[in-house]
Amino acid sequence: MDPVADSATAAFLSQVDRLLGSLLLRIRRCAVSSALREDADIACALCDADGRSLIERGGNPVLRGALSAQVRAILAQDHSAWSLSADQALIANSESLPTPSSEPAAKDREPVVREASLWAGFVDRQTFALLVPLVPPAAQPEAAASSVSLRVLYLALGARFPRAPFGSLPSAEAGLCIDALAPAVDSELANLPPAVGPRYLPFAPPPPAAPPRLQHDEGSALSATVIDERSLPAILRRTSLCREAQSDLLALHACLLQGRKALSALLLRIGWDQAQAQCRALYEQTAQATQRLLSALPAGFYAFADSLDEDGCGATDLALRATLLLRRDEATLDLCDSADAAAGPLNLSAAASVAVVKEAVYRLLHTLDGNASAHAGRLPPSDALCRGLTLRLRRGSIVAAESPSAHALACDETAQRLMDVLQGVFAQVLPSRVAAGSAGTRSAVYVAEPPGVQGTARAESLAERRIVLPGGLGAQPEPGAFSGALFPAMLPSIEALEASVPVRVQTLALRPDSAGLGLRSGEPGWHRALVFLRPQQVTLAGERRRRPPYGLAGGGPAATGQDVLQRDRAMRKLPAKAILHAQAGDVIETESPGGAGHGDAQRAAFFASLFDGGS
């Protein structure tokens, strides 16, 4: 590409990226729920007429990478999106699943995904996508759709409102309350609440085959619907969202319309035809950089596997397997050997799996030296990252699940484990450029009022607060190495947490001796103790409680995580995925995994002993 065109494309990217960043910042300032305000579970994208993302922006890589698939799913249902009025948009959180074509998608249209449904575009029903068209001013509604669709662009916005993955416990009258089930003799177990892990019920008959689940656990389906300021409240009341999430969707709609106004003004100032040309040039520039990257990798066959601890419904060691075949003119990533879809809420849709793969390619592009990384600083995430890669998925597997499989935890835990697997694959391709395994989990605790509080359904009136505890990052062999940690290691505000949830943070400190050893040690995990001030329903959703994060190049693994309940003087280790009634004064201690080490751990221990002896 000549320097003049490259400079113009870089200027266009800078302006659009700044507008998209301003849009996300405006949303975080207006948001009420912690998922948007603190965890930044939002993303936006500029897409072309076919639904391909040209520029993606957002803090959650899974939402960001899957947004273009959601746009295509919405457009597949409503072909008149370009004729929406100035105050209207399209909103959806699920889509009907038409029979996919048997022909693979063309490489210049969207990521190539074989043996999986491309229509499974949404991450889960907790993820909402809003869409508005950007139409040139000369296009009139009465014009033929074919003459407009070639020039239209779309501004898309995605947001996720996470909720507890296992519904709620039955009331005390159902016989699961500790007072009714405690043994007559006072003992260490007598003071413990029932930890209902779908596999774990200490004072009850054998656990059921499935966890206690309510009909709205995965959220209500909302097909592509035209919304405006007047109709949106009535539509949102059907989505089984809490009131603060409904308020946030109203704010999302208003911010999206403001973003469209600002972006349309920019496109008019640049010139619509010139803007279209810059969009095509940007897409091709990213695609060419990706193809150069893949062709420069050493040819060979690489494989790696890891597993999820459990799904909360009895299944353990849910395998995720990846094989990468690299040739001079071909790169194929095969995930078909992964486990079947689980009964628990750990299933990824095809769109979410593609998003994780895109993020891995994007990070690899930034990691490597040469021309690819020289351009990477100016190249945004987009669908062009999959141009030279063929991804094989098996329908019905845990990485290509479809309705009615549960997805509530997949965006956090399964997506992170898939990234860990891809990191292990790339560690074989480029041993000196890939960091060791990070914590591999968000170690989330969901807190909500017990059922029946205030005499209303909890999902309609009360918010569930997700409290995330980050873990340690894996050791890097060199600065800027490929890291597989999907989510930033950010601690939530203690003041904001104690103001919104009836808990007190008793302890928050780094966890000693939790990092993996090696020539370069990983980062330690965190230890946190929450004291409950009044009865609450608590849902635990953790991973890396059975298998630790892996080290590389001889580095040692990190410590696994754990959750402990303390009531009075009794302590009990809890399963990774469980539900319990916390009483006033209960303490739940969570220890997140550390990061694994990189390099020969025995050699590092030997040198450390020399220094210890000299002291």
Image: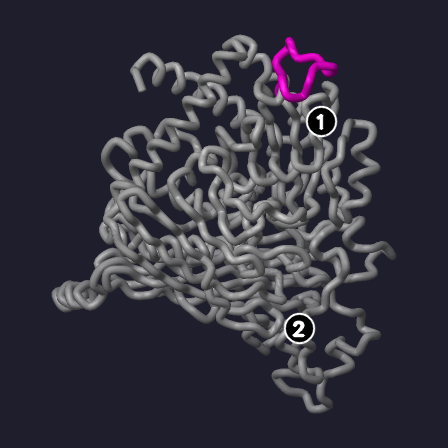
In the rendered image, residue 246, in percent from the top left (x then y), is placed at: 75, 40
Q: Is residue 461 left or right of residue 597?
A: right
Q: Position of residue 499 (x, y in %)?
A: 66, 47
| Mark number displayed over residue 206 | none
Q: Nearer the viewer, residue 575 or 84?
A: 84
Residue 163 image point, x, y percent: 66, 53
Span highlighted in magenta in the image: 134-147
> In the image, which disc is placed on residue 80?
1
Residue at the spot of label 2: 196
Q: Is residue 265 left or right of residue 321?
A: right
Q: Secondary structure at mark 1?
A: loop
User: Is residue 523 shown to the viewer in this render?
Assistant: no
**Depth check: 575 or 589 in front?**
575
Q: Which numbered disc flags the more N-terminal residue, 2 or 1? A: 1
Q: Is residue 141 above or below residue 614?
A: above
Question: The N terminus is located in which quarter?
Answer: top left
The amino acid pointed to by label 1 is Ser
Q: Main secondary structure of the magenta part?
A: loop
Residue 180, visible in the rendered structure: yes
Which residue sits at x=25%, y=31%? 371
In this view, the mark in front (2 or 1): 1
